Image (cartoon, rainbow, N blue to C red):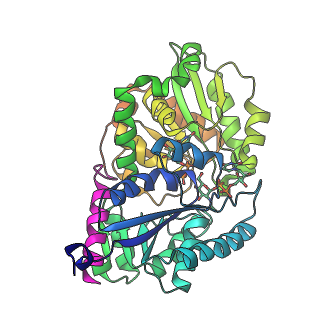
Amino acid sequence: MTAQLARNPAARILVVFGTRPEAIKLFPVIAALRADPRFEPVVCVSAQHREMLDQVLEIAGIVPDHDLDLMQPGQTLDGLTAALLTGLGQVMDAVRPARVMVQGDTATAMAGALAAYYRKLPVDHVEAGLRSGNILHPWPEEVNRKIIGAMASLHFAPTETAAGALLAENVDPARVHVTGNTVIDALKWVTARIAREPALAGGLAEVERRFAGRRIIGVTSHRRENFGDGMASIAGAIRRIAARPDVAVIFPVHLNPNVRQVMNEKLAGLDNVALLEPLDYLHFARLLGLAEIMLTDSGGVQEEAPALGKPVLVMRETTERPEGVAAGTARLVGTDEDRIVTEIFTLLDDKAAYEAMARAHNPFGDGRSAARIVELLGNEIGQA
Ligand code: UD1
Ligand code: UDP
């Protein structure tokens, strides 16, 4: 027998994802798996998102091995989930992986885990253990991640708090590992790239010129539980904030039609508001750098802003990411129009209030989470 034949074959890991934030948080893990001869990563995208997913794939240099191309305009949760379960199951049958990796709490992650479980394949969950304690906020993500948690083999918790939530649900402590959040790996990578080559994020130059001398507020919004009244109230708040001559709002608008319609109706054409198409990650990192304050209902932005010392006002009633709030960089403000305006004006006008929030710290990770995850997976397959 040759030395090569005597070695274990590389473990085939099917990495499944479908939306922008999953792609951002998994590309560092895919890179680390690819660099390690013990693994044979196979990438399957559901394309639950299309354009917003492709923006990340391009920057990260990932060409998926399987692309289900599932996105439908205005897709429903049940139609999407049914298509995901069938499509991902078929890919698993064709690829025959040793393990399946999912990230976070999207429909793709939940259906990917379920399809793997139906085949008795071990599921590795990146960003495990986030809990708000309210199954309607965020909706449906709180339940998606609980479903994944019920099936996962390895739980990669970003923080001690997240690990604690899993232990409180009686998950075997030997299966729970605190790794940090891979979003910090991604953010560091992208920030270093821009530092080396600023032209990569040069697409904001026009808006930067237009708003020179103004205080920039960066906005993102897309949560399903905010659709309807919540989105209308957010748009109303932005109108009032942008009425200040010293302020400018840069708002890359999510492609979900429930967001775009109301934002276009209420904010298009305002002097101090730039409604942009979704920014690729290089340009979004540039926006995080330019902004004095971030106003968002995003999960990922709540993790990135503290790492950069940017005060972040979170337009939610509750958060599964309490670490930013505990550290003082993030504040929950809900979606009430008056409250959002008051909170923003306080940060703009009260230097002490601003400085109390604007401190860089890293409760969500140190940028080495992907390496930890791959090491833990290596230990796991070594035991098999
Ligand atoms: C999804 C996730 C949410 C995550 C968010 C990140 C679920 C149930 N929701 O929400 O957890 O926080 O992604 O952004 O998994 N669209 C496009 N092009 C795109 C992306 C979306 O046109 O590239 C439009 C389509 O009309 C699509 C709609 O947005 O039907 C909604 O997309 P969907 O993935 O169902 O929900 P999101 O609100 O994006
Ligand atoms: N993001 C981006 N371009 C944008 C808006 C956000 O690249 O125009 C990034 C952001 O930096 C973060 C991620 O997308 O890493 C968050 O995605 P989103 O808010 O859509 O989803 P969530 O994190 O709420 O699930």
Residue 137 position, x and y percent, is: 58, 62
- The residue at 50%/39% (across/down) is 281
**As rendered, which of 375 and 105 lies closer to the eye?**
375
Q: Residue furthest left?
A: 3
107 relative to 57 in the view: left or right: right
Task: Tell me: residue 283, above or below residue 304.
Answer: above
Point out residue 96 in the picture as x, y percentages from the top left corner.
Answer: 50, 78
Query: In the picture, which quadrant includes the C terminus?
Result: bottom left
Q: Is residue 200 above or below residue 356?
A: above
Instruction: Name the residue furthest front.
Output: 1
Magenta run includes residue 365: yes
Q: Residue 275 location in percent, x, y?
A: 67, 30
- In which image quadrant can residue 307 be found? top left
Res. 182 image quadrant: bottom left
Residue 269, above or below 336: above
Image point 36% across, 45% down: which residue?
328
Q: Is residue 234 magenta?
A: no
Residue 286 % position (x, y): 46, 30
Q: What span is in magenta?
A: 363-384
Mark yes or no: residue 128 visible.
no
Could you say which is closer to the camera, residue 205 or residue 30?
A: 30
What type of secondary structure mainly makes up the magenta span?
helix
Snapshot quadrant of residue 205: top right
Q: Is residue 240 visible?
A: yes
Q: Pick the residue in front: 203 or 144.
A: 203
* Residue located at (70% from left, 42% from top): 233
On screen, residue 130 versus residue 211, left or right, reads: left
Q: Quadrant of the N terminus?
A: bottom left
Residues 364 and 255: in front is: 255
Give the answer, above or below, for where 38 lies relative to 32.
Answer: below
Callout count:
0
